[in-house]
Image (cartoon, rainbow, N blue to C red):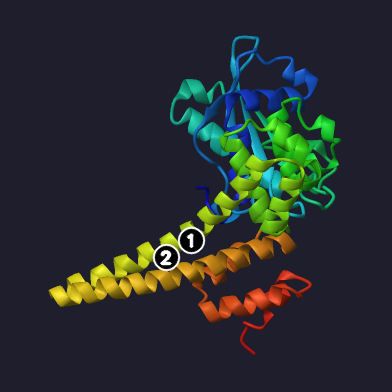
Amino acid sequence: MADLHNPHDTLFRALLSDPGRAGDFLRDHLPNTIAGQLAPAPPEILEGSFIDEALAGSQSDLLLKVALKAGTNAFVYVLAEHKSAPDPALPLQLASYMIRIWKRHAGTRAARLRALPPIIPVVVYHGAATWTVADSLRDMIATEDPDLAFLPGAGYILRNLRAMEIDALSRNAALKAGFITLRREALAFLTEIARSLPAGSDLRRQVLEYVLRVYNVDMDDLRALLRTGGHNELEALVGTIAETLLEQGEARGLAKGEARGLAKGKAEGKAEGKAEGKAEGKAEGKAEGKAEGKAETLRRQLERRFGPLPRDIEARIADAGPERIEAWLDAVLDAPDLATVFAQDRPH
């Protein structure tokens, strides 16, 4: 099961981790002057991420190696921006990520340092706010003299999923369905999505999991919509996903509690201490599992209303006790913004 805390990253990687879909994405979204230089072979998906740790909750990335018709290779670096509003620092971040890619590729080998492969940067954005970020670092530098504008990168290619026509999202039906889901329009296109995602496929489950965790829709309402459309398999899958998410949260809490209990018993060096510790750990684990389930519900509600959560908010939720989580769950129903939800917790 995917990371509970970052559904955007989970679906993004599920969509482009298949070489065939990744190849279709490049043919659909690269300019013809670049796409025409690609060899027919599908791209190679390379391991690793280059994103700053502080931005890992709001960005995803994927590095592809592509063959060119000229006989050489290039990289395509796909950076997904998951924030509800664009980050004006993105061109600067992107330049640093590209430098990291070149440094990893070359290492200390002089021959590679003298012949770095091209990197084609592609930014994917699906937030509701208008894209207002500078097109390149050059546009961020405060000078009119081109001789003073020394640049580590010339720009990037933006694919704003929100601003595109539905039919232009992709010629690949599964990729198109995933992008519609990222745009939060899956409920309006349920029949098309059900038809586009093969029965029993991992991607079908991952798309439904994203809808369940990110969309502002009740599980029973979602199942009713699927039932009305005749998508019985998807209706059953929604229930399975919901149960698994809850069980995963409770299992993590139980494992932590049992481990603490066993450690306590071992330290005391007595059989009765170990038994007592294990029992205590199981009890604590069950309680913690329920608390983690409520914490995940809070995260899901906050993300549905206000978008991806800042790291400091994630940390506060992770450290909070059950009573505080309950208070925040009550506050999120009527709060106009994220700050209001957590205002009551601040010292006076």
Please identify the residue farthest to the bottom as the structure is shown: 348
Numbered disc 2: secondary structure: helix
The residue lying at 70 percent from left, 14 percent from top is 37
The label shown at residue 101 is none
Neighbor class of circle 1 (other Cα within 10 Å; few <14, some 14-19, many 20+) is many
Residue 125 position, x and y percent, is 74, 44
Amino acid of disc 1: Gly
The residue lying at 41 percent from left, 70 percent from top is 286
Q: Quick check: marks 2 and 1 in contact, CB under 8 Å?
A: yes
Q: Specify whether 53 is left or right of 138.
A: left
Count of labels in the image: 2
Residue 89 position, x and y percent, is 71, 51
Location of the C terminus (image quadrant): bottom right
Neighbor class of circle 2 (other Cα within 10 Å; few <14, some 14-19, many 20+) is many
Residue 61 visible in the displayed image: no
The label shown at residue 249 is 1
Q: Which residue is the site of mark 2?
A: 253
Amino acid of disc 2: Gly
Which of the two residues, 200 or 337, is positioned nearer the viewer here?
200
> Toward which corner of the image does residue 191 lie, by quadrant?
top right
Which of the two residues, 46 or 135, is positioned nearer the viewer here?
46
